Amino acid sequence: MTVLTRFAPSPTGKIHVGNARTALFCWLFAKSNGGRFMLRLDDTDAERSTDAFAQGIINDLAWLGLNHDLTAKQSERFNKYDAVFEKLRSDGLIYACYETPEELELKRKRQLSRGKPPVYDRAALNLSADEIAAFEQEGRKPHYRFKLSGHPVIWEDLVRDTQKIDTASLSDPVLVRADGTYLYTLPSVVDDLEFGVTHIIRGEDHVTNTATQVEIIQALDGTIPIFAHHPLLVMADGSALS
């Protein structure tokens, strides 16, 4: 197996010390194992991503001596994501939801006030054809969620050892916003599979995301990468350094 790691910043601002640290870990791991290091620009946010920020990231990595072996831009790969989205949808693993952000926030507050975790209740799965037609007549555009299995996801993390996330405790993740744009999750999985990323090294704030991504990978019959979630940089008082 040839090791391939990836550093995946969003070019919506300048690189910061936390990003640089993750890039260094990815580069060192790849090079120490005779592998390759990929820079993936997660630029699906067209309003905030700029060529100037992307070039700045490339320049900063070069200044740090972290030269990458290949580059990918998510903004050039929407056809790939669309194809996978349609496959998952046809397999019954993606469903449309019509709640507004305000309605979702109200649900969340109600659950918290009752001492319950703010997990999406899958109400959209029980909508009748008439209710859906009424929403669409009203002008609502659906967002789309991936239906989690409700089973535990377990993996051996290179940093945190055995990890277990019960997907029954998670909300079905939104993959596509009501405006039709992709969130991070699906494009990231598609790219990791297509480019053959073997090791995903990133901050521990992504641990929960990993359970969701593993389930999508399994739904696509893909090979699950090896994960390593490192601690985040913080100030002495525990606040975020970046």
Image (tube, rainbow, N blue to C red):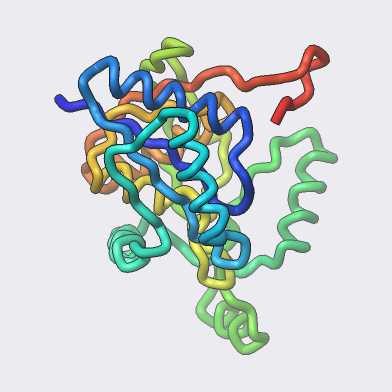
* Residue at the farthest left position: 1
Q: Position of residue 238 (x, y in %)?
A: 77, 17
Q: Position of residue 204 (x, y in %)?
A: 55, 24
Residue at screen point 26% across, 48% down: 220
Residue at screen point 50% across, 27% down: 22
Evaluate whether residue 228 shows in this view. Answer: yes
Q: Quadrant of residue 195?
A: top left
* Residue at the farthest bottom position: 137
Q: Position of residue 236 (x, y in %)?
A: 79, 12
Q: Position of residue 211 (x, y in %)?
A: 45, 33
Image position of 193 (left or right of 50): left
In the image, 178 versus 197, the foreground residue is 197
In the image, 209 versus 158, the foreground residue is 158
Image position of 36 (left or right of 186): left
Image position of 155 (left or right of 104): left
Q: The C terminus lies in which quarter of the figure?
A: top right
- Examine the rendered structure and indicate whether residue 114 appears above or below residue 156: below
Evaluate whether residue 125 shows in this view. Answer: no
